Amino acid sequence: MTAMTPEPGGRRVDHRIVVGVDGSESSKAALAWAIRQARLTGAVVLAVTAWAFPDEYGYPMIMPTLDWKRLATQVVTAAIREVGLGDIPVRYEVVRGNAARALVAASGGADLLVVGSRGHTGFVEALLGSTGQHCVRHATCPVVVVREAGH
């Protein structure tokens, strides 16, 4: 039996909810859902944001002096502030690389992985985005896909 390690505020670090945050409304909805679930279960929340240089996807580097990691950090910290923590601490991790792979890796040993769903309409609404699809197929823990409010 594994000993449970409490975190300040009574959170249990052996229970972890990982949530993907990219600054979109759907990712903020996912973060809010993860925080509510953590409040119910005593888990800690880890918000993960991934970044990559645009030229890694075939685009020329427009601003070579731009600090992509700093911008990604600003995105995740702004989302955490906007969603509002209340009494639930949210840790964050900024990872260079593919978002889907980063989320699956971060969710290893987690209780839950939470991702937002892009707000498509019509028939496409039934389909997940590529990141959500990858997470649902490859995560080793349960995955919750949260739609933004109003959908």
Image (cartoon, helix red, strand yellow):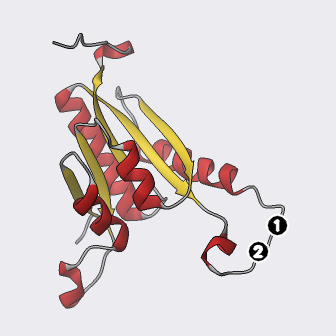
Q: What distance separates the C-alpha of mark 1 from that of mark 2?
A: 6 Å
Residue 47 x %, y %: 43, 43
Most distant residue in the bottom direction: 122
Q: Is residue 35 at least partly visible in the picture?
A: yes
Mark 1: which secondary structure?
Answer: loop
Q: How many marks?
A: 2
**Front in this rendered view, residue 111 or 73:** 111
Q: How crowded is mark 2: few (under 14 residues within 10 Å), some or many (20 or more)?
A: few
Mark 2: which secondary structure?
Answer: loop
- What residue is shown at x 52% (from left), y 55% (from top)? 50
Q: Name the residue under label 1.
A: 64
Residue 45 x %, y %: 35, 35
**Amino acid type, residue under disc 1 in the picture:** Pro
**Amino acid type, residue under disc 2 in the picture:** Met
Q: Residues within 10 Å of mark 1 (few under 14, many from 20)?
A: few
Q: Do the residues labelled 1 and 2 touch (CB within 8 Å)?
A: yes
Q: Please tell me whether residue 83 is drawn above or below residue 45 in the rendered image.
A: below
**Front in this rendered view, residue 8 or 94:** 94
- What residue is shown at x 55% (from left), y 46% (from top)? 94
Q: Is residue 20 at least partly visible in the picture?
A: no
Q: Quadrant of the C terminus?
A: bottom left
Residue 62 x %, y %: 78, 76
Residue 150 x %, y %: 24, 69
> Which label is found at residue 96?
none
**Front in this rendered view, residue 23 or 57:** 57
Give the quadrant of residue 144. bottom left
Q: Please tell me whether residue 85 is drawn above or below residue 11 in the rendered image.
A: below
Q: Name the residue under label 2.
A: 61
Q: Quadrant of the N terminus?
A: top left
Most distant residue in the right direction: 65
Taking 66 as reference, is 129 left or right? left
